[in-house]
C-alpha cells in the first residue's frame, strides 16, 4: 500500500470517531524510521482508545499491517506503529505537554492540519494587534 493511501485511511479513521486537531507531518527528511507522523486528540481516555482501535481496524481492513500499539491500558496517549506511519492519539493536556509537532516539525515542516480553523496570515495577525491610527 502506498504512503498516501495509508495516510488517507488513518486520517479518515480518526475523523470517523471525531478525533480533532489532526496533524500530519512529513518526516522523510528528518528520519529514516518512518515517512509520516500523525498526531490527533481525543477528549477522554475512552475516546483516545477508540480512535487508536479504529485506526488499527481500518488499516487491517484495507490490507495494511499494524506493527505495534502501546498505551491502550491508560488511554492518555496511544501510539500505533504502522511502519511508514506512526500515529499518536493523545488527550489535549498530554499533547500540549509533549508538543510532538514542535519536536518533529523542524524548520519548515510539510504540515496538513485537519479539524482546526485555518491559521491567519502573518499580515492579518499583525494588523489585528496594531491599533488603528
Image (cartoon, rainbow, N blue to C red):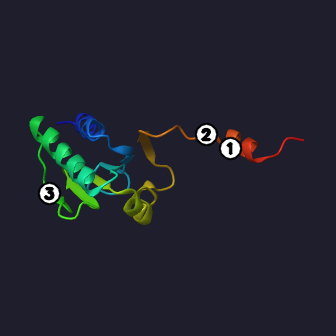
Q: Which mark is residue 120?
A: 2
Q: Which residue is mark 1?
A: 125
Q: Is residue 114 left or right of residue 58?
A: right
Q: Which residue is mark 3?
A: 68
Image quadrant where one finds the N terminus: top left
Q: Work out whether residue 25 or residue 78 is closer to the camera in this orientation and state it.
A: 78
Q: Work out whether residue 33 or residue 61 is closer to the camera in this orientation and state it.
A: 61
Q: Work out whether residue 130 or residue 110 is closer to the camera in this orientation and state it.
A: 130
Q: Secondary structure at mark 1?
A: helix
Residue 8 drawn at (x, y percent): 27, 35
Q: Secondary structure at mark 3?
A: strand
Q: Are marks 2 and 1 in contact (CB under 8 Å)?
A: yes
Residue 125 drawn at (x, y percent): 68, 43
Which residue sits at x=46%, y=49%? 109
Image quadrant where one finds the C terminus: top right
Which residue sits at x=32%, y=44%? 19
Amino acid at each position: 500500500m502506498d504512503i498516501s493511501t495509508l495516510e488517507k485511511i488513518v486520517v479518515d479513521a480518526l475523523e470517523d470517531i471525531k478525533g480533532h486537531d489532526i496533524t500530519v507531518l512529513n518526516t522523510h527528511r528528518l528520519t529514516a524510521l518512518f515517512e509520516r507522523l500523525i498526531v490527533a486528540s481525543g477528549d477522554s481516555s475512552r475516546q483516545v482508545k477508540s480512535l487508536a482501535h479504529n485506526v488499527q481496524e481500518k488499516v487491517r481492513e484495507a490490507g495494511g499491517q499494524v506493527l505495534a500499539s502501546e498505551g491502550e491500558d491508560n488511554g492518555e496517549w496511544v501510539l500505533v506503529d504502522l511502519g511508514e506511519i506512526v500515529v499518536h492519539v493523545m488527550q489535549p493536556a498530554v499533547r500540549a505537554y509533549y508538543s510532538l509537532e514542535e519536536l518533529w516539525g523542524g524548520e519548515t515542516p510539510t504540515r496538513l492540519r485537519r479539524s482546526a480553523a485555518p491559521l491567519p496570515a502573518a499580515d492579518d495577525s499583525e494588523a489585528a494587534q496594531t491599533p488603528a491610527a
